[in-house]
Amino acid sequence: MKLLSNEVDKDGSGTMKLVPEEPEDMWHTYNLLCKGDFLRATTIRKVQRESATGSTESERVRLSLTIEVTDIEFDSMASKLRVNGRNVVETDHVKVGAFHTIELELNRAFSIGKKEWDAVHLERIREATDPTVSADLAAIVMQEGLAHICLVNRSMTIVRSRIETNIPRKGQNSIFNRDKAMAKFFDSVLRAVLQYIDLTVVKVCLIASPGFVKDAFFRFMVDEASRKNHRSIIENKFKFIHAHSSSGHKQALEEVLSSPAMQTRLQDTRAVAESGALQAFFDTLTSDPDRAVYGPGHVFYADSMCAIQTLLLTDQLFRDVDVGKRKKHVTLVEHVRASGGIVHILSSLHTTGEQLASMTGIAALLRFPLPDLDEFDFEDEGFDPAENTGE
């Protein structure tokens, strides 16, 4: 997703202009749009024209419309998004108040206006427009004299840097020059890793190459990190895993990632992490039920006690028509993160989101047990921590 303009005021109201570039961007847009928002986009509308003789004929014209959103339809199989609403800006062809359906298209700009862009909306924008935020897998695919530094998210692989160095061929007279050239090459790759890979964000960094190039580079990287005190590498070297690839080209990375063996090893990527968090909740609910809660009442109460270590919510909660409910969940997310907790917002199109939705759509793992919660009488729509913590 490309962000063309951001005209959001300090009070949170305003408009953002975006261009969807990947099918996944339609999913992000679906989660950004809410009923009551304003959408401006180019669309096709059939209009009636009256000729000089009094006869009428219809034709399809392309025009820009601004509608107030009343309904949103997302086709996950085709990644198509249709938005229904009332026109709010009169044009030559469409009166104010007339209903229209806009179908958003890839690579065609649109603008979303909101009375309030909350923290979850802004996080979604950041995730959609900055691939480094959503990419939890980094990869260094290399061969002698060639390396690609890549970031991999759920929909694409982004090449952040290409390093190419001439390496002398093996031979009696070129051993010294060859070793010197390889050291220079490894140093260039290491500098690119430090510049383009945030090891505090990515969960796995894959090093792939033919032969033993990957092993030699890893030794070089660890030695240099110790010598120059590169803390990010020293503290995260456990995240690096090695794999064989056919070459140092980007295409070779796709081969590595698609292998069943590598899929098994990549157990800490984002989707698997979310699945693991939900499974941890179910396991704790069975083995230590006082440290696992679900349902809005219990979860909001646990938050008021600063007891939440891991919060699980479905993205459906943030598409609620009731602005008050949505704000309550946004505040919950902000409060849990501020107290050092982890938040997972699960997709309703993923099996993990479906499972959580069947249990009210909200659950939490606790830092410490809260026994006898069932004896409390909570409101169905959620316990308000502000009313019980003096905030």
Image (cartoon, rainbow, N blue to C red):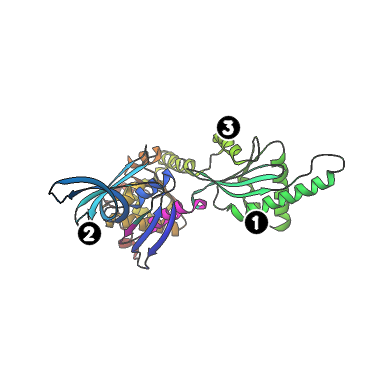
Residue highlighted by disc 1: 231
Tell which residue pokes out farthest to the left in this image. 54
Name the secondary structure under disc 1.
helix
Direction top: furthest residue: 260
Q: Which residue is mark 3?
A: 261
Q: Of label 3 and label 2, which has the lower sequence position? A: 2
CB under 8 Å between discs 1 and 3: no
Residue 39 vs 178, above or below: the answer is below
Q: How many marks?
A: 3
Query: Residue 372: horizontal and vertical position, in percent?
Result: 34, 48
Asked if the residues shown at circle 1 and circle 2 are in contact, with their CB atoms under 8 angstroms apart, the answer is no
If you read the primary sequence from the N terminus, does the residue marked by circle 1 or circle 3 appear first? 1
Q: Which residue range is magenta in the image?
A: 112-132
Taking the spot 65% from the left edge, 40% from the top edge, the residue there is 248
Whether 326 is drawn above or below 265: the answer is below
Q: Position of residue 362 (x, y in %)?
A: 35, 47
Q: Amino acid at mark 2?
A: Glu
Q: Amino acid at mark 3?
A: Ala
x 71%, y 36%: residue: 211
The three-letter code of the residue at mark 1 reads: Arg
**Residue 265: x and y, percent?**
57, 37
Cα–Cα gap, marks 1 and 3: 30 Å
